[in-house]
Image: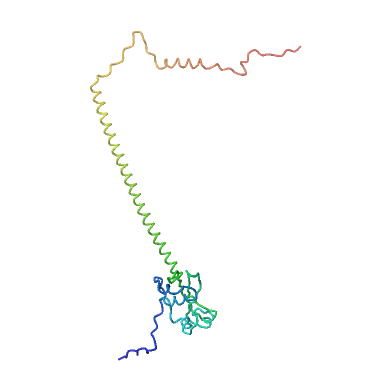
Amino acid sequence: MALPPPPPGDGAAALPPPPGTDMTGICFRDQLWLNTYPLDRNLVFDYFALSPFYDITCNNESLRSRQIHPLDMSQLMMMTGMEYVLSEVMEPHLFVMRKQRRSNSDKVEHLLAYYILDGSIYQAPLLGNVFASRISRTMHHISKAFSIACSKLEKIGNAETESDAAASESKTQKEAVDFKELIRIDKILMTLQKKLPPAPPPPPYPEGYVPPSASEEKAPDDLLASEALPPVIDPIIDQGPAKRPRFQ
């Protein structure tokens, strides 16, 4: 049977777990500390060490235990491992703290960034997470816009279909009414034709009058046409008596 591990000694205190990588949903603020101490570049690290973003295993904590300022770069550059450095300062409103891993005095690997804005501490999101969030939000709005546009187009199509159907129904009804009206008018005309007497025959010609034939009717027109046309004159033959020059 395995025995449980022995409890830690009285002088040894259990270390808190290291902070997580993604803590962008957390905001830390200690109003009591802010009312007691000024927030400047000398005390900002002590305020940051109170937050859950602080890793107690960093090199800055080692410097604090030796009564050295935790942001002393001359001391941090001689150490290796995890550390925090103050990268941007706009007193008293904005402080940017960068978490990095140091391999030697010249080589560091940037891991995370934190910013203190008017006393509230936040973790800056990673660039990849920012792009992913913006793209996801953009796709959501584009999909919503397409859904609204499709619903509008469906309503427009239904309205056009209904208007076309109403127009065709009205046209059909109008044509039916016109056809009935035509039948009614035909019936009225047939009734009137039956009631009226037949048309009388034309009166006879007087005695001795002979109606002209078709050829005789056309003759006066031909005569008028021949009188209206001028006579044809030959420009060479019909020039009258020739005029010859006289020689003396």
Q: Where is residue 169 in the image (x, y as percent from the top left)?
A: 29, 41
State whether residue 202 is above or below residue 118.
Answer: above
Residue toward you, 229 or 126: 126
Seen in the image, is 104 located left or right of residue 129?
right
Seen in the image, is 244 located left or right of residue 184?
right
| Residue 28 visible from this viewpoint | no
Q: In which quarter of the image is residue 11?
A: bottom left
Instruction: Return the residue found at the far front.
Output: 36
Residue toward you, 149 or 15: 15
Task: Tell me what residue is drawn at x 30 percent, y 43 percent.
Answer: 166
| Residue 199 visible from this viewpoint | yes
* Picture mark count: 0
Seen in the image, is 186 located left or right of residue 15?
left
State whether residue 80 is above or below residue 133.
Answer: below
Q: Quadrant of the N terminus?
A: bottom left
Q: Position of residue 52 (x, y in %)?
A: 40, 76
Residue toward you, 132 or 170: 132
Q: In which quarter of the image is the C terminus?
A: top right
